[in-house]
C-alpha cells in the first residue's frame, strides 16, 4: 500500500514538471501564472550519451552596397560633319541627256552613306520646257532614284513655270519638294520652308521659287521671325549674275531679307551660266555667302556636275566640292579653286 502511494506521487510530480525537462542538454523554462516551475532531472541509461547540439551558424546579413554615382562624361563627343548635295539647272538633261540625269541622281543615292548626306537641294530649271511631258517624265525617272534614300528640296526656275506667266501647275503636280504640307508652304509650294538638326545646330531651309509676286515677302519674314535661332540656307533660282553681282531678284532679297535677318548665312542659286561667289558682312557682324553654278550650257564638257556641301562643325566651315559622276571628274574649271574651296565661319 505504501509502495503504491509512492509510485502515484512520483507519477504526479513527473507530470507537473514536464515544462522544465532538460532536452538535448538545454533547459527550457516556461513561466505559468507567476509560479516557479518544477525542475526534474532525467538521468540517461548507462552508456547512453547526450546528443550534441546541432550547431547553427549565425548568419550576418550582407551589407547593402551603396550605389556609386555614375561618372559624368569628361569629354562630350564632337558633333559629326554632314553633307547636302546641290544640283542646279538640270534642264538640258531633261531635254537631251536623260542618262546624265539618271547618273547624277544614282550617284547621290548610292553615296549618301559615305558622305553622311542628309538630302538634295535643287535650285530650279528642272526641265527645259514646262509644256513638254517628256521633260517631266525624264525628271521624275531620275529624281525617283532618291526614293527611300534621300529627301529632295527644290525651287522652281523660269523654265519650270514660265518667265512671265508663272504657271506652277505642272511643277507642283510632280511633288518634287519634301516640304509639302500646310504651314510649310506659301501658295501650295511657290515658297516653302523646312527644318532639320545636324552637327549640333538647328537649320532652316527656305525656298523662294521663280515669280513676279511680291506678296511672298511678309510670309517669308514671318517664318524667319518664328525661327530666329536656326541657321538659314536660302534656295532661289536667280540671285547672282555670271560676274558675281546681284540680279534684280538678288537685290530685292538682299535688301529685304539678308540685311535684316542675321540667321540667313548661305544663299544657293543657278540660272546664269558658269560659277560665281558673293559675300557680304553686315553692321551687326553676320556674314552671308552666296554661291551660284550652272554648267549645263556646255553640252560637251559641262555634263553631270553636282556640288557636295560638307558642313564641318569644328570651325563652322563649309567645304564645297564639285564632281561629275558622268565624267568621273572633279572641277569643271582648270582653276580648281573656282570649284573646290572652303568657307570658314560660314554657318
Image (cartoon, grey):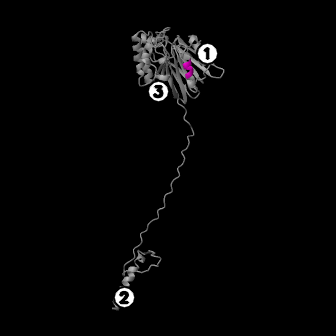
- Residue 114 numbered mark, or none: 3
Residue 27 or residue 275, whichever sits in front: 27
Q: Between label 2 and label 1, give the one nearer the viewer.
A: 2
Q: Is residue 2 above or below residue 206?
A: below
**Looking at this rendering, what residue extends furthest in the front direction?**
33
Q: Between label 3 and label 2, give the one nearer the viewer.
A: 2
Residue 268 or residue 117, whichever sits in front: 268
**Looking at this rendering, what residue extends furthest in the right direction?**
283
Residue 216, given in percent of the width and then of the height, sits at 54, 16
Residue 329: tell me if it is visible. no
Measured in 3D between alpha carbons, the distance from the residue under mark 3 to the one under mark 2, in whole angstroms, is 109 Å
Q: Which one is earlier in the sequence, the residue at label 2 or at label 1?
A: 2
- Residue at the spot of label 2: 6
Q: Quadrant of the N terminus?
A: bottom left
- Residue at the spot of label 1: 255
Taking the image as shown, residue 176 lies to the left or right of residue 8, namely: right
On whether residue 219 falls in the magenta region, the answer is yes
Occupied quadrant, residue 268:
top right
The reply to whether callout 2 and callout 1 are in contact (CB within 8 Å) is no
Q: Which one is earlier in the sequence, the residue at label 1 or at label 3?
A: 3
Stretch of the chain drawn in magenta: 218-222
Q: Around disc 3, counting alpha carbons within 10 Å, would you say few (fewer than 14), some (14 to 19), or many (20 or more)?
A: few
Residue 301, given in percent of the width and then of the height, sits at 48, 11
Q: Which one is earlier in the sequence, the residue at label 3 or at label 2?
A: 2
Measured in 3D between alpha carbons, the distance from the residue under mark 1 to the one under mark 3, in whole angstroms, is 39 Å
Amino acid at each position: 500500500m505504501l509502495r503504491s502511494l509512492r509510485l502515484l506521487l512520483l507519477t504526479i510530480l513527473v507530470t507537473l514538471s514536464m515544462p522544465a525537462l532538460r532536452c538535448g542538454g538545454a533547459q527550457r523554462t516556461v513561466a505559468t501564472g507567476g509560479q516557479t516551475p518544477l525542475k526534474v532531472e532525467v538521468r540517461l541509461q548507462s552508456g547512453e550519451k547526450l546528443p550534441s547540439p546541432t550547431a547553427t551558424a549565425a548568419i550576418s546579413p550582407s551589407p547593402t552596397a551603396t550605389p556609386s554615382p555614375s561618372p559624368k562624361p569628361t569629354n562630350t563627343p564632337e558633333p559629326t560633319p554632314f553633307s547636302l548635295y546641290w544640283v542646279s539647272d538640270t534642264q538640258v538633261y531633261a531635254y537631251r541627256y536623260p542618262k546624265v540625269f539618271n547618273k547624277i541622281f544614282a550617284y547621290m543615292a548610292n553615296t549618301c552613306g559615305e558622305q553622311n548626306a542628309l538630302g538634295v537641294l535643287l535650285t530650279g530649271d528642272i526641265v527645259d520646257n514646262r509644256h513638254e511631258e517628256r521633260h517631266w517624265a525624264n525628271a521624275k525617272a531620275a529624281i525617283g532614284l532618291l526614293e527611300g534614300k534621300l529627301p529632295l528640296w527644290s525651287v522652281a526656275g523660269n523654265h519650270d513655270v514660265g518667265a512671265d506667266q508663272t504657271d506652277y501647275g505642272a511643277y507642283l503636280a510632280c511633288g518634287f519638294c519634301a516640304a509639302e504640307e500646310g504651314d510649310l508652304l506659301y501658295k501650295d509650294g511657290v515658297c516653302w520652308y523646312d527644318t532639320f538638326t545636324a552637327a549640333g545646330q538647328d537649320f532652316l531651309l527656305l525656298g523662294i521659287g521663280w515669280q513676279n509676286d511680291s506678296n511672298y515677302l511678309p510670309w517669308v519674314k514671318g517664318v524667319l521671325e518664328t525661327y530666329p535661332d536656326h541657321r538659314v540656307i536660302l534656295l532661289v533660282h536667280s540671285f547672282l549674275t555670271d560676274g558675281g553681282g546681284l540680279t534684280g531678284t538678288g537685290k530685292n532679297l538682299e535688301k529685304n531679307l539678308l540685311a535684316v535677318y542675321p540667321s540667313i548665312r548661305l544663299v544657293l542659286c543657278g540660272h546664269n551660266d558658269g560659277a560665281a561667289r558673293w559675300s557680304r558682312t553686315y553692321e551687326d557682324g553676320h556674314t552671308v555667302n552666296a554661291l551660284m553654278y550652272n554648267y549645263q550650257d556646255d553640252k560637251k564638257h559641262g555634263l553631270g556636275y553636282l556640288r557636295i556641301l560638307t558642313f564641318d562643325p569644328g570651325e563652322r566651315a563649309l567645304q564645297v566640292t564639285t564632281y561629275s559622276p558622268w565624267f568621273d571628274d572633279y572641277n569643271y574649271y582648270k582653276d580648281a579653286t573656282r570649284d573646290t574651296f572652303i568657307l570658314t565661319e560660314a554657318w
